[in-house]
Image (spheres, rainbow, N blue to C red):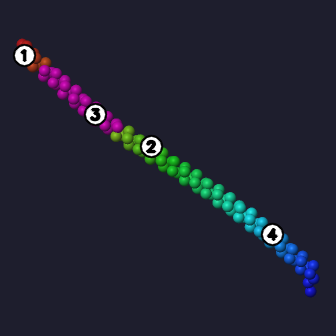
Amino acid sequence: MTTISEAITTIKKAENDADNLIADAEKKSADLIEESHSKADEAVEKAKKEAQEKSEAIIFEAETKAQKEAYQISNKTDEKIEITKRKATDAVDEAVAVIVKTVL
């Protein structure tokens, strides 16, 4: 038969074991929370980086397209200027011919 002293010792040991289990569980819980925060921070940083890269790619694409369009507009404008110059030169030649005929 177990004596009261042995029973108390057994209870104290069980309480001590329970306290150790609680401490271990709290430490594991804290470690898991810290790991979760760390992983969440990493995921946020990764998402930010990917978003930044995508936005830079979109901006680059838009700038390239705008440059191409500006170049095309510039070329069309240059062509129209040349046509207008030719027409003006032709008109000057015709005006000179008319003046020469009128004066002579």
Question: Distance between the Cα atoms at labels 2 and 3?
Answer: 25 Å
> Label 1 crowding class (10 Å Cα cut-off): few <14, some 14-19, many 20+?
few
Does residue 63 appear left or right of residue 18 in this picture? left
Q: Quadrant of residue 11?
A: bottom right
Q: Secondary structure at mark 1?
A: helix
Q: CA distance from mark 3 to mark 4?
A: 86 Å
Find out whether the residues at labels 4 and 1 contact each other: C-beta distance under 8 Å: no
Residue at image mark 2: 60
The mark nearer the N terminus, 4 or 1, is 4
Q: Residue at x 15, y 21 (%)?
A: 93
Mark 3 near mark 4, Cβ–Cβ under 8 Å? no
Q: Nearer the viewer, residue 48 or 60?
A: 48
Task: Please provide the residue range marked out in magenta.
Answer: 70-95
x, y percentage for residue 56?
A: 48, 45
Q: Which residue is mark 3?
A: 77
Mark 3 element type: helix
What residue is pinned by disc 1? Answer: 102
Type of the residue with mark 2: Phe
Residue 19, given in percent of the width and then of the height, sits at: 80, 69
Q: Residue at x 16, y 25 (%)?
A: 90
Q: Nearer the viewer, mark 3 or mark 4?
A: 4
Q: Earlier in the sequence, mark 1 or mark 3?
A: 3
